[in-house]
Amino acid sequence: MSLNALRETNNREPDLFIEMFIVFLTKAVDLLLTDQIFSQKKTFVEQNLITSLSLLSNLHESIVSRKLRYEIDDSYTLPFDEKQQLKIRLLIYELKSRIYHSGDLSKTVQAQCSRLIDQLLAYYPPRPNVRIIIECSKKVSPWLAST
């Protein structure tokens, strides 16, 4: 994908860009942390991971800022539908898990990544679980007892 095409995707559909970028980072973490190259260029890989997460966080901040500038509702939420937000949230959790379970990253880098991912997750508030409770005023006998 060319740089111009990436910019256009980012401007038109930021949710799809964010989703693709998180999937890319997850696959890159898997590939780079299991490869022999990682041991040779560990600091380079760690710096790029932190930089990528920082850019992703800045992108979220920019989207919310632009929304606040042009809209009146003053909510600090992303202009994505709930289904897309849930999908991105799950991808972020998967990335966090992969980073956490890789024993190759230094503790400092893991802490920085965790902080940046927590910042990202703040843009995707968890949805409360819905419980449906049906109350019946009269006692109903079991269907086998009524025959």
Image: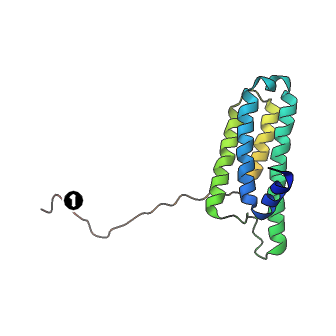
User: Would residue 122 be visible to someone looking at this image?
Assistant: no
Please state which of residues 130 and 19 is positioned toward the viewer in this rendering. Answer: 19
The answer to whether 122 appears left or right of 128 in the picture is right
State the image coordinates of residue 52 (x, y, percent, origin top left). Answer: 82, 44
Chosen colour scheme = rainbow
State the image coordinates of residue 7 (x, y, percent, origin top left). Answer: 84, 57
Q: Give me the residue at 61% from left, 60% from top.
A: 83
- Residue farthest to the bottom? 72
Split into 4 quadrants, where in the image is the C terminus? Answer: bottom left
The image shows residue 90, relative to residue 27, as above or below, that is below
Q: Give me the residue at 72% from left, 50% from top.
A: 20
Q: Give me the residue at 79% from left, 37% from top.
A: 111
State the image coordinates of residue 8 (x, y, percent, origin top left). Answer: 81, 60
Please state which of residues 24 and 110 is positioned toward the viewer in this rendering. Answer: 24
- Residue farthest to the left? 147
| Secondary structure found at label 1 | loop
Q: Amino acid at mark 1?
A: Pro
Q: Give me the residue at 79% from left, 46% from top.
A: 116
Mark 1 Cα within 10 Å, few/some/many (few <14, many 20+)? few
How many marks the image carries: the answer is 1
Give the residue at mark 1: 142
The image shows residue 30, relative to residue 119, as above or below, that is above
State the image coordinates of residue 80 (x, y, percent, origin top left). Answer: 69, 64
Please state which of residues 59 and 126 is positioned toward the viewer in this rendering. Answer: 59
The answer to whether 134 appears left or right of 27 in the picture is left
The image shows residue 83, relative to residue 114, as above or below, that is below
Specify the quadrant of the image occupied by residue 6. bottom right
Specify the quadrant of the image occupied by residue 97. top right
User: Would residue 135 be visible to someone looking at this image?
Assistant: yes
